[in-house]
Image (tube, rainbow, N blue to C red):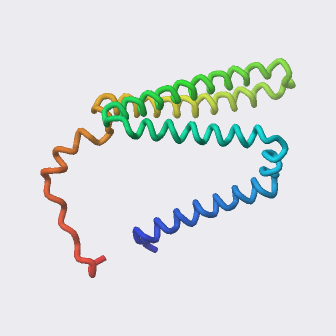
Amino acid sequence: MRFGHHTRILAVLVIIALAGLWSLYDWLFVTAGPAYFAADWRRAMLVAAVSIFGGLVVFAVMNLPEASRRWVIRSVFAGLVIVALAGCCVSIWGFFQLREVAPPGAMLFLRIVAGIYLGLCLLIGGAGIWYLRLTWRVGGDAGQANHSRQATAAPPPRRPSSMI
């Protein structure tokens, strides 16, 4: 069965809506999220302060000139990649610290899990570094190098809708 473009978009939106409703149900009824904030008013104020500060930062970044905005976004992304890699290294170090408290038969399992985790961390870090190198090499936009060719090339012929 072939899905049309609109059907795929609708399916993705339904999945996102269901995931959002599930998260809302989990927060409201399973983990008693509102009770957490109602227990201490400072928690709600902290969430409000972080939200307002984050909105102001996004507003300020979006009002920067295009080149400056790209530089800020790339720099923040680079910082997040470095923090993610540092977190991965600390987590793997923590896995190997478990050998002091783990039973002797569990060390092989811990080494396997740490190896898989190291592979995932290297994959995430490598993808982040690859993306940063790509965007810095072409001047900020991953597809910017092809814009001049795409603007002059004629679009491919379209099939009539009756043939689809």
| Residue 93 lies in quadrant | top right
Across and down, in percent, residue 162 comes to 27, 81
Q: Which sits in the foreground, 65 or 106?
A: 65
The image shows residue 29, relative to residue 109, as above or below, that is below
Across and down, in percent, residue 26 comes to 75, 55
Left or right: 135 with respect to 3?
left
Q: Which sits in the foreground, 74 or 52?
A: 52
Across and down, in percent, residue 40 comes to 82, 41
| Residue 88 lies in quadrant | top right
Across and down, in percent, residue 158 comes to 21, 69
What residue do we see at 70% from left, 60% from top?
22
Q: Which sits in the foreground, 61 or 21?
A: 61
What residue do we see at 68% from left, 26% from top?
91
The image shows residue 23, relative to residue 157, as above or below, that is above
Left or right: 114 with respect to 136?
right
Count numbered badges in the picture.
0
What residue do we see at 33% from left, 29% from top?
136
What residue do we see at 40% from left, 34% from top?
131
